[in-house]
Amino acid sequence: MVNYIWVGMTIIGLVFAAVNGTMSEVNEAVFKGAQEAVTLCIGLISILVFWLGMMRIAENAGLLEKLANLFKPFITRLFPEVPAGHPAMGYILSNMMANVFGLGNAATPLGIKAMEELKRLNGGKDSASRSMITFLAINTSSITLIPTTVIAIRITYDSASPTEIVGPTLIATSISTIAAILIDRYFYYRRSRKG
């Protein structure tokens, strides 16, 4: 469906440009946008490679495992249906650690694996379990210490202080995560009282 929307918007834009005689501006914008996209991607790749490397070093040094163990008591309370040694718990913790370091691209495959494991725990049903809903809420709002992607974009566009976003990002993502957990719990308890 989304593809049809994009194609429709593109056709409408081209027809509008042809009718108004602004096709040359459209061509210029297309090529300029493509050039900026390549520049941005190269900038993002370098920053992401750096932070993924740092994450690998932290993993090999045991730092991620220590962080995961630090958060484990809290996470097991958020996901009471997930057994302690189940692979889903490992994927959930790894996903959350990747999000904490602003590595959304690295967190995505871990999140998909976590959902697959949670679906297995749910008996393969098509309806989402309590743990799946909680994980989605937390993953969407995740606390971020180092917003790697945003810093990379700010560096690419020559920001005077690309890392000044760290404090506001930490505050905003902390509030959003707390709100997501509270809303998730509210609807869970409300639904369980009705059932």
Image (spheres, grey):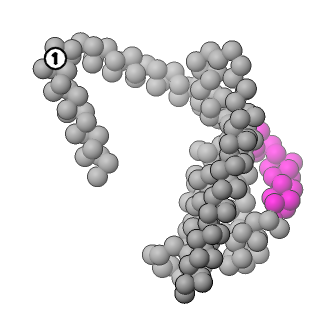
Relative to 76, say whether 59 is above or below. Answer: above
Residue 47 in which image quadrant:
top right
Question: Left or right of 35: which side holds 74?
Answer: right
Q: Is residue 182 visible?
A: yes
> Where residue 171 appears, x then y in whole percent?
73, 42
Give the main secondary structure, helix, strand or loop, of the magenta stretch. Answer: helix
Q: Nearer the viewer, residue 89 or 19?
A: 19
Q: Residue furthest bottom?
A: 195
Hey, what amino acid is under mark 1?
Asn
> Where residue 90 appears, x then y in whole percent?
72, 64
Residue picked out by circle 1: 20
Question: Left or right of 120: which side holds 17?
Answer: left
Residue 9 in which image quadrant:
top left
Report the residue at 34% width, 18% height from top: 29
The 10 Å Cα crowd at callout 1, few under 14, some 14 to 19, many 20 or more, is: few
Residue 132 in which image quadrant:
bottom right
Q: Label 1's element?
A: helix
59 drawn magenta: yes
Q: Is residue 118 visible?
A: no
103 drawn magenta: no
Say how many tags the image has: 1
Question: Left or right of 110: which side holds 170?
Answer: right
> Where residue 190 appears, x then y in whole percent?
59, 76
> Where residue 3 appears, x then y in whole percent?
29, 46
Relative to 83, say whether 144 is above or below. Answer: above
Relative to 14, say whether 132 is above or below. Answer: below
Question: Left or right of 37: which side holds 99?
Answer: right
Report the residue at 68% width, 79% height from top: 81
In the image, the segment drawn in magenta is 49-72
Report the residue at 72% width, 69% height from top: 78
Q: Quadrant of the C terminus?
A: bottom right
